[in-house]
Image: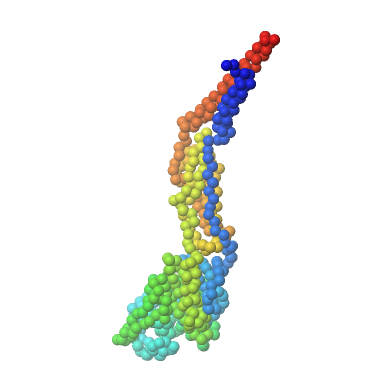
Amino acid sequence: MKITRFAYTAITLFILIITISFFFPYLIFPDHKTVTFKAPAWHLPILKDGNIALYDDYIEIEAENAILMDAQTGSILWEKNSWQPVYPASITKIMTGIVAIEYITDLGAVVEISKNASGSNHSFFAFQEGDRITLLGLLKAALISSHNNATIALAEYVSGNTQDFVDIMNDKARDIGAYNTNFENTSGLDSNSPGHKTTAYDVALMARYAMQDELFREIVGTASAEILINDEYVLLENTNRLVTYDYIKGIKTGYTENAGFCLAIYSDLSGRELIAVVLNSSAESRESDALKLIYWADNNIKTLKIVDSTIPLETVEVGDSTRIDIDLYAQEDISATVHISSDDVKVIKTVGSRTVLPADTEEIMGEVTVSINGSDVGSTSLVSKVAVDEPVIIQEIVKDSRQKRIISLIAILAFYFFIIIFIIFKNLFIKKYKY
Protein backbone atom coordinates (compact mmCIF):
# COMPACT_ATOMS: atom_id res chain seq x y z
CA MET A 1 0.00 0.00 0.00
CA LYS A 2 1.35 3.36 -1.05
CA ILE A 3 1.68 6.19 1.45
CA THR A 4 0.54 9.50 0.00
CA ARG A 5 2.45 12.77 0.32
CA PHE A 6 -0.23 14.07 2.71
CA ALA A 7 0.19 11.05 4.97
CA TYR A 8 3.98 11.51 5.01
CA THR A 9 3.57 15.15 6.00
CA ALA A 10 0.93 14.46 8.66
CA ILE A 11 2.95 11.70 10.33
CA THR A 12 6.07 13.87 10.29
CA LEU A 13 4.32 16.85 11.88
CA PHE A 14 2.66 14.63 14.51
CA ILE A 15 6.02 13.15 15.56
CA LEU A 16 7.55 16.65 15.63
CA ILE A 17 4.78 18.06 17.87
CA ILE A 18 5.01 15.13 20.30
CA THR A 19 8.80 15.55 20.54
CA ILE A 20 8.65 19.31 21.17
CA SER A 21 5.85 18.99 23.77
CA PHE A 22 7.98 16.44 25.67
CA PHE A 23 11.07 18.63 25.85
CA PHE A 24 9.40 22.07 26.07
CA PRO A 25 8.83 22.14 29.88
CA TYR A 26 12.48 21.31 30.58
CA LEU A 27 13.65 24.19 28.42
CA ILE A 28 11.26 26.84 29.71
CA PHE A 29 10.81 26.11 33.43
CA PRO A 30 13.69 25.83 35.97
CA ASP A 31 14.11 22.76 38.19
CA HIS A 32 12.62 24.15 41.41
CA LYS A 33 9.37 24.57 43.30
CA THR A 34 7.95 27.57 45.15
CA VAL A 35 6.53 27.22 48.67
CA THR A 36 4.17 29.90 49.90
CA PHE A 37 3.48 30.46 53.63
CA LYS A 38 0.63 32.61 54.81
CA ALA A 39 0.74 33.58 58.48
CA PRO A 40 -2.43 33.29 60.55
CA ALA A 41 -3.98 36.56 61.73
CA TRP A 42 -6.83 37.66 63.93
CA HIS A 43 -8.63 40.94 63.37
CA LEU A 44 -8.59 43.51 66.20
CA PRO A 45 -8.59 47.23 67.01
CA ILE A 46 -5.36 49.21 67.29
CA LEU A 47 -3.58 49.35 70.63
CA LYS A 48 -4.17 52.55 72.54
CA ASP A 49 -1.22 54.75 73.42
CA GLY A 50 0.02 55.62 76.87
CA ASN A 51 -0.95 54.16 80.24
CA ILE A 52 -4.45 53.25 79.12
CA ALA A 53 -6.16 49.88 79.13
CA LEU A 54 -5.44 47.62 76.20
CA TYR A 55 -9.10 46.61 75.93
CA ASP A 56 -12.38 48.44 76.35
CA ASP A 57 -14.83 45.54 76.43
CA TYR A 58 -18.03 46.25 78.32
CA ILE A 59 -17.93 44.66 81.79
CA GLU A 60 -20.87 45.43 84.04
CA ILE A 61 -19.62 46.26 87.54
CA GLU A 62 -20.98 48.48 90.28
CA ALA A 63 -17.63 49.86 91.46
CA GLU A 64 -17.01 53.46 90.47
CA ASN A 65 -13.27 52.86 90.04
CA ALA A 66 -11.63 49.66 88.89
CA ILE A 67 -8.63 48.22 87.11
CA LEU A 68 -7.31 44.86 85.93
CA MET A 69 -3.54 44.57 85.66
CA ASP A 70 -1.27 41.79 84.40
CA ALA A 71 0.85 41.13 87.48
CA GLN A 72 3.80 39.85 85.46
CA THR A 73 4.08 42.64 82.90
CA GLY A 74 2.28 45.54 84.59
CA SER A 75 0.08 45.99 81.50
CA ILE A 76 -3.36 47.46 82.11
CA LEU A 77 -5.87 45.07 80.59
CA TRP A 78 -9.04 46.93 81.55
CA GLU A 79 -9.96 49.98 83.61
CA LYS A 80 -12.80 52.19 84.76
CA ASN A 81 -11.96 55.62 86.16
CA SER A 82 -8.66 54.17 87.37
CA TRP A 83 -6.92 57.58 87.37
CA GLN A 84 -9.44 59.32 89.62
CA PRO A 85 -8.13 60.06 93.17
CA VAL A 86 -10.48 58.48 95.72
CA TYR A 87 -10.45 57.29 99.33
CA PRO A 88 -8.86 53.81 99.60
CA ALA A 89 -10.00 52.86 103.14
CA SER A 90 -8.03 49.86 104.50
CA ILE A 91 -6.48 49.15 101.10
CA THR A 92 -3.96 51.59 102.63
CA LYS A 93 -2.61 48.72 104.70
CA ILE A 94 -0.96 47.20 101.63
CA MET A 95 1.63 49.98 101.79
CA THR A 96 1.74 49.92 105.62
CA GLY A 97 2.49 46.21 105.54
CA ILE A 98 5.23 46.25 102.90
CA VAL A 99 7.02 49.21 104.52
CA ALA A 100 6.96 47.41 107.88
CA ILE A 101 8.38 44.24 106.32
CA GLU A 102 11.20 46.15 104.60
CA TYR A 103 12.14 48.23 107.67
CA ILE A 104 11.85 45.65 110.45
CA THR A 105 14.78 43.26 110.70
CA ASP A 106 13.41 41.07 113.53
CA LEU A 107 9.69 40.41 113.23
CA GLY A 108 9.93 37.98 116.14
CA ALA A 109 10.68 40.79 118.58
CA VAL A 110 8.02 41.39 121.25
CA VAL A 111 6.70 44.93 121.75
CA GLU A 112 4.29 46.57 124.19
CA ILE A 113 1.19 48.36 122.95
CA SER A 114 1.37 52.08 123.69
CA LYS A 115 -1.50 54.22 124.90
CA ASN A 116 -1.75 55.72 121.43
CA ALA A 117 -2.15 52.27 119.86
CA SER A 118 -4.60 50.92 122.45
CA GLY A 119 -8.37 50.65 122.16
CA SER A 120 -10.41 49.23 119.32
CA ASN A 121 -10.27 52.15 116.85
CA HIS A 122 -12.88 50.48 114.61
CA SER A 123 -11.09 47.13 114.92
CA PHE A 124 -12.91 43.93 115.81
CA PHE A 125 -10.95 43.52 119.06
CA ALA A 126 -9.23 46.01 121.31
CA PHE A 127 -5.60 46.35 122.34
CA GLN A 128 -4.94 47.18 125.95
CA GLU A 129 -2.08 49.49 126.84
CA GLY A 130 0.85 47.31 127.86
CA ASP A 131 -0.26 44.24 125.86
CA ARG A 132 2.71 42.26 124.64
CA ILE A 133 2.73 40.99 121.07
CA THR A 134 5.32 40.17 118.42
CA LEU A 135 5.83 42.45 115.47
CA LEU A 136 4.84 39.54 113.22
CA GLY A 137 1.60 39.25 115.21
CA LEU A 138 0.95 42.95 114.62
CA LEU A 139 1.64 42.54 110.91
CA LYS A 140 -0.79 39.63 110.66
CA ALA A 141 -3.44 41.55 112.59
CA ALA A 142 -3.08 44.50 110.23
CA LEU A 143 -3.15 42.52 106.98
CA ILE A 144 -5.49 39.62 107.83
CA SER A 145 -8.12 41.13 110.10
CA SER A 146 -7.45 44.77 109.08
CA HIS A 147 -6.66 45.87 112.66
CA ASN A 148 -6.19 49.63 112.65
CA ASN A 149 -4.27 49.96 115.92
CA ALA A 150 -1.83 47.27 114.78
CA THR A 151 -0.69 49.66 112.04
CA ILE A 152 -0.09 52.39 114.62
CA ALA A 153 2.02 50.04 116.76
CA LEU A 154 4.09 49.03 113.72
CA ALA A 155 4.63 52.67 112.75
CA GLU A 156 5.74 53.60 116.25
CA TYR A 157 8.24 50.75 116.28
CA VAL A 158 9.75 51.68 112.90
CA SER A 159 9.71 55.48 113.12
CA GLY A 160 8.84 56.41 116.71
CA ASN A 161 5.62 58.08 115.55
CA THR A 162 3.00 57.63 112.83
CA GLN A 163 3.72 60.79 110.87
CA ASP A 164 7.30 59.87 110.04
CA PHE A 165 6.11 56.41 109.05
CA VAL A 166 3.47 57.95 106.76
CA ASP A 167 6.23 59.99 105.13
CA ILE A 168 8.06 56.72 104.38
CA MET A 169 4.84 55.32 102.90
CA ASN A 170 4.50 58.29 100.56
CA ASP A 171 8.14 58.10 99.53
CA LYS A 172 7.73 54.40 98.78
CA ALA A 173 4.61 55.09 96.74
CA ARG A 174 6.53 57.54 94.56
CA ASP A 175 9.43 55.10 94.23
CA ILE A 176 7.18 52.49 92.64
CA GLY A 177 5.37 54.99 90.39
CA ALA A 178 2.21 55.64 92.41
CA TYR A 179 2.43 59.38 91.84
CA ASN A 180 -1.26 60.15 92.46
CA THR A 181 -1.20 58.77 96.00
CA ASN A 182 -1.14 60.74 99.23
CA PHE A 183 -1.29 58.93 102.55
CA GLU A 184 -2.18 60.82 105.74
CA ASN A 185 -2.37 57.86 108.12
CA THR A 186 -1.40 54.20 108.38
CA SER A 187 -4.84 52.61 108.56
CA GLY A 188 -7.02 54.24 105.91
CA LEU A 189 -9.55 55.82 108.26
CA ASP A 190 -10.46 59.04 106.47
CA SER A 191 -12.97 60.98 108.59
CA ASN A 192 -10.16 63.28 109.72
CA SER A 193 -7.95 62.81 106.66
CA PRO A 194 -9.59 64.50 103.66
CA GLY A 195 -6.37 64.34 101.64
CA HIS A 196 -5.85 60.61 102.15
CA LYS A 197 -6.41 59.46 98.58
CA THR A 198 -5.07 57.24 95.85
CA THR A 199 -6.20 55.79 92.51
CA ALA A 200 -7.14 52.30 91.39
CA TYR A 201 -4.07 52.32 89.14
CA ASP A 202 -1.78 53.27 92.02
CA VAL A 203 -3.32 50.57 94.22
CA ALA A 204 -2.57 48.00 91.51
CA LEU A 205 1.03 49.20 91.34
CA MET A 206 1.42 48.94 95.12
CA ALA A 207 -0.22 45.51 95.20
CA ARG A 208 1.99 44.26 92.39
CA TYR A 209 5.09 45.47 94.22
CA ALA A 210 4.02 44.08 97.60
CA MET A 211 3.11 40.65 96.24
CA GLN A 212 6.69 40.15 95.11
CA ASP A 213 7.60 39.81 98.80
CA GLU A 214 7.24 36.23 99.95
CA LEU A 215 6.16 37.03 103.53
CA PHE A 216 3.60 39.61 102.46
CA ARG A 217 2.20 37.15 99.91
CA GLU A 218 1.95 34.41 102.54
CA ILE A 219 0.15 36.59 105.09
CA VAL A 220 -2.47 38.16 102.78
CA GLY A 221 -3.30 34.73 101.34
CA THR A 222 -4.04 33.24 104.77
CA ALA A 223 -7.71 32.58 105.50
CA SER A 224 -7.20 32.47 109.27
CA ALA A 225 -4.36 32.54 111.78
CA GLU A 226 -3.73 32.69 115.50
CA ILE A 227 -1.57 35.31 117.18
CA LEU A 228 -0.40 35.42 120.79
CA ILE A 229 -1.26 38.51 122.83
CA ASN A 230 0.27 38.26 126.29
CA ASP A 231 -0.46 34.60 127.06
CA GLU A 232 -3.68 34.33 125.06
CA TYR A 233 -4.22 33.16 121.49
CA VAL A 234 -6.49 35.31 119.38
CA LEU A 235 -8.02 33.95 116.16
CA LEU A 236 -7.77 36.21 113.12
CA GLU A 237 -10.25 35.74 110.26
CA ASN A 238 -9.36 37.22 106.88
CA THR A 239 -11.73 40.02 105.90
CA ASN A 240 -11.16 38.98 102.28
CA ARG A 241 -13.62 36.11 101.86
CA LEU A 242 -12.28 35.30 98.40
CA VAL A 243 -9.07 33.77 99.77
CA THR A 244 -11.07 30.57 100.23
CA TYR A 245 -10.95 30.24 96.42
CA ASP A 246 -7.83 28.29 95.52
CA TYR A 247 -6.84 30.77 92.78
CA ILE A 248 -7.21 33.93 94.92
CA LYS A 249 -4.00 34.69 96.84
CA GLY A 250 -5.04 37.87 98.69
CA ILE A 251 -4.86 40.84 98.97
CA LYS A 252 -6.90 43.37 100.98
CA THR A 253 -10.38 44.67 101.69
CA GLY A 254 -11.44 48.14 102.77
CA TYR A 255 -14.49 50.11 103.84
CA THR A 256 -15.32 53.58 105.08
CA GLU A 257 -18.37 55.70 104.46
CA ASN A 258 -16.32 57.94 102.17
CA ALA A 259 -14.55 55.13 100.31
CA GLY A 260 -17.40 52.67 99.97
CA PHE A 261 -16.55 48.97 99.77
CA CYS A 262 -13.10 48.33 98.29
CA LEU A 263 -11.16 45.23 97.36
CA ALA A 264 -7.82 44.33 95.79
CA ILE A 265 -7.30 40.69 94.83
CA TYR A 266 -4.48 38.69 93.32
CA SER A 267 -5.46 35.75 91.12
CA ASP A 268 -3.56 32.98 89.34
CA LEU A 269 -6.59 31.43 87.64
CA SER A 270 -5.50 29.30 84.66
CA GLY A 271 -1.89 30.19 85.42
CA ARG A 272 -2.31 33.90 84.63
CA GLU A 273 -1.29 36.25 87.45
CA LEU A 274 -3.68 39.18 87.65
CA ILE A 275 -4.42 42.04 90.03
CA ALA A 276 -7.99 43.31 90.18
CA VAL A 277 -8.87 46.45 92.14
CA VAL A 278 -12.39 47.74 92.74
CA LEU A 279 -13.02 50.91 94.73
CA ASN A 280 -16.27 52.53 95.86
CA SER A 281 -18.45 49.49 95.30
CA SER A 282 -21.19 48.08 97.53
CA ALA A 283 -21.23 45.36 100.18
CA GLU A 284 -23.23 43.12 97.83
CA SER A 285 -21.08 43.70 94.72
CA ARG A 286 -17.51 44.15 95.94
CA GLU A 287 -16.46 40.52 95.52
CA SER A 288 -18.52 39.87 92.39
CA ASP A 289 -17.10 43.00 90.74
CA ALA A 290 -13.55 41.79 91.27
CA LEU A 291 -14.36 38.25 90.10
CA LYS A 292 -16.05 39.55 86.93
CA LEU A 293 -12.76 41.17 85.94
CA ILE A 294 -10.82 37.97 86.59
CA TYR A 295 -13.31 35.79 84.68
CA TRP A 296 -13.41 38.22 81.74
CA ALA A 297 -9.64 37.91 81.43
CA ASP A 298 -9.76 34.13 81.72
CA ASN A 299 -12.30 33.93 78.89
CA ASN A 300 -10.74 36.48 76.55
CA ILE A 301 -7.06 37.16 77.25
CA LYS A 302 -4.55 34.43 76.43
CA THR A 303 -0.79 34.20 76.18
CA LEU A 304 -0.07 32.44 72.89
CA LYS A 305 3.10 31.08 71.39
CA ILE A 306 2.71 32.88 68.09
CA VAL A 307 6.06 31.78 66.67
CA ASP A 308 7.26 28.26 67.51
CA SER A 309 10.98 27.68 66.99
CA THR A 310 10.40 23.93 66.44
CA ILE A 311 8.22 24.39 63.36
CA PRO A 312 9.64 25.52 59.98
CA LEU A 313 8.28 28.94 59.03
CA GLU A 314 9.63 29.22 55.50
CA THR A 315 11.35 27.15 52.81
CA VAL A 316 13.98 28.78 50.62
CA GLU A 317 15.94 27.57 47.63
CA VAL A 318 19.68 28.01 47.49
CA GLY A 319 22.28 26.97 45.02
CA ASP A 320 23.23 27.85 41.47
CA SER A 321 22.84 25.05 38.94
CA THR A 322 21.23 22.85 41.55
CA ARG A 323 18.42 24.29 43.65
CA ILE A 324 18.15 22.83 47.16
CA ASP A 325 15.23 23.48 49.54
CA ILE A 326 16.23 24.55 53.06
CA ASP A 327 13.67 24.91 55.87
CA LEU A 328 14.06 28.01 58.01
CA TYR A 329 13.14 28.12 61.70
CA ALA A 330 12.73 30.95 64.19
CA GLN A 331 15.81 31.22 66.37
CA GLU A 332 13.58 31.79 69.43
CA ASP A 333 9.91 31.43 70.33
CA ILE A 334 7.79 34.57 70.30
CA SER A 335 4.88 34.65 72.75
CA ALA A 336 2.43 37.46 73.41
CA THR A 337 -0.74 38.21 75.32
CA VAL A 338 -3.69 38.71 73.00
CA HIS A 339 -7.44 39.20 73.09
CA ILE A 340 -8.43 36.03 71.27
CA SER A 341 -11.48 37.52 69.57
CA SER A 342 -10.29 40.98 68.63
CA ASP A 343 -6.52 41.46 68.49
CA ASP A 344 -4.97 41.81 65.02
CA VAL A 345 -1.94 39.53 65.16
CA LYS A 346 0.40 39.37 62.18
CA VAL A 347 3.52 37.32 61.49
CA ILE A 348 5.83 39.06 59.02
CA LYS A 349 8.71 37.12 57.47
CA THR A 350 11.62 38.69 55.63
CA VAL A 351 13.96 36.30 53.79
CA GLY A 352 17.31 37.39 52.34
CA SER A 353 18.28 36.99 48.70
CA ARG A 354 21.15 34.60 49.41
CA THR A 355 21.35 31.86 46.74
CA VAL A 356 24.85 30.40 47.08
CA LEU A 357 25.84 27.17 48.80
CA PRO A 358 27.20 25.98 51.20
CA ALA A 359 24.81 26.86 54.07
CA ASP A 360 25.85 26.53 57.72
CA THR A 361 23.86 25.36 60.75
CA GLU A 362 22.17 28.30 62.54
CA GLU A 363 23.05 30.53 59.63
CA ILE A 364 20.82 33.62 59.65
CA MET A 365 18.82 33.82 56.43
CA GLY A 366 16.02 36.19 57.41
CA GLU A 367 13.88 37.61 60.19
CA VAL A 368 10.39 37.08 61.56
CA THR A 369 8.46 39.83 63.38
CA VAL A 370 5.18 39.63 65.29
CA SER A 371 2.94 42.68 65.47
CA ILE A 372 -0.27 43.18 67.43
CA ASN A 373 -2.63 45.88 66.27
CA GLY A 374 0.16 47.44 64.24
CA SER A 375 2.76 47.51 67.04
CA ASP A 376 5.77 45.16 66.96
CA VAL A 377 5.91 42.95 70.05
CA GLY A 378 8.85 40.70 69.18
CA SER A 379 11.23 39.59 66.47
CA THR A 380 13.86 36.92 65.95
CA SER A 381 16.11 35.61 63.20
CA LEU A 382 15.20 32.92 60.69
CA VAL A 383 17.93 30.29 60.62
CA SER A 384 18.70 26.96 58.98
CA LYS A 385 18.90 23.93 61.26
CA VAL A 386 21.19 21.84 59.04
CA ALA A 387 24.43 22.41 57.18
CA VAL A 388 24.35 21.88 53.40
CA ASP A 389 27.61 21.50 51.45
CA GLU A 390 27.94 22.65 47.85
CA PRO A 391 26.92 19.60 45.70
CA VAL A 392 29.52 19.97 42.93
CA ILE A 393 29.04 16.48 41.44
CA ILE A 394 25.27 16.68 41.50
CA GLN A 395 25.38 20.08 39.86
CA GLU A 396 27.52 18.75 37.01
CA ILE A 397 25.21 15.80 36.48
CA VAL A 398 22.18 18.01 36.35
CA LYS A 399 23.97 20.42 34.03
CA ASP A 400 25.09 17.57 31.70
CA SER A 401 21.59 16.11 31.74
CA ARG A 402 20.06 19.35 30.58
CA GLN A 403 22.70 19.80 27.88
CA LYS A 404 22.07 16.26 26.60
CA ARG A 405 18.33 16.94 26.38
CA ILE A 406 18.98 20.07 24.31
CA ILE A 407 21.44 18.26 21.98
CA SER A 408 18.98 15.36 21.57
CA LEU A 409 16.20 17.78 20.67
CA ILE A 410 18.38 19.53 18.09
CA ALA A 411 19.37 16.17 16.57
CA ILE A 412 15.75 15.04 16.33
CA LEU A 413 14.67 18.34 14.82
CA ALA A 414 17.54 18.12 12.29
CA PHE A 415 16.59 14.54 11.46
CA TYR A 416 12.99 15.43 10.75
CA PHE A 417 14.05 18.52 8.86
CA PHE A 418 16.10 16.37 6.47
CA ILE A 419 13.20 13.92 6.13
CA ILE A 420 10.87 16.75 5.20
CA ILE A 421 13.39 18.10 2.67
CA PHE A 422 13.86 14.59 1.31
CA ILE A 423 10.11 14.11 0.86
CA ILE A 424 9.77 17.47 -0.86
CA PHE A 425 12.64 16.74 -3.31
CA LYS A 426 11.37 13.22 -3.91
CA ASN A 427 7.93 14.47 -4.78
CA LEU A 428 9.37 17.10 -7.10
CA PHE A 429 11.55 14.46 -8.80
CA ILE A 430 8.64 12.04 -9.29
CA LYS A 431 6.46 14.81 -10.67
CA LYS A 432 9.16 15.90 -13.15
CA TYR A 433 9.72 12.47 -14.71
CA LYS A 434 6.11 11.46 -14.53
CA TYR A 435 5.11 14.13 -16.91
Q: Nearer the viewer, residue 376 or 80?
A: 80
Nearest the eye: 77 or 354: 77
Q: Is 121 rendered above or below residue 135?
A: below
- The image shows residue 408, relative to residue 65, as above or below, that is above
Where's the C terminus, which quadrant?
top right
Asked which colour scheme the image uses, the reply is rainbow
**Relative image position of residue 430 (x, y in whole percent):** 65, 12
Residue drawn where x is 35% and y is 88% of the image: 131
Which residue is more in the foreground, 336 or 298?
Answer: 298
Could you say which quadrant of the image residue 2 lies in?
A: top right
Could you say where residue 111 lies in the image, as x and y percent from the top left? Answer: 35, 84
Image-based side of 430 in relation to 208, left or right: right
Measuring 67% from the left and 10% from the top, which residue is drawn there? 434
Relative horizontal placement of residue 406, taking residue 155 as reference (left or right): right
- Give the x, y percent position of residue 34: 54, 42
For the point 44% across and 71% down, which residue is it? Answer: 267
* Residue visible at 48% across and 75% down in the picture: 290
Most extreme residue toward the front is 1
The answer to whether residue 176 is visible is no
Q: Would residue 194 be seen by someone viewing this image from the given angle?
A: yes
Give left or right: position of 23 versus 231: right
Q: Position of residue 213 (x, y in %)?
A: 41, 71
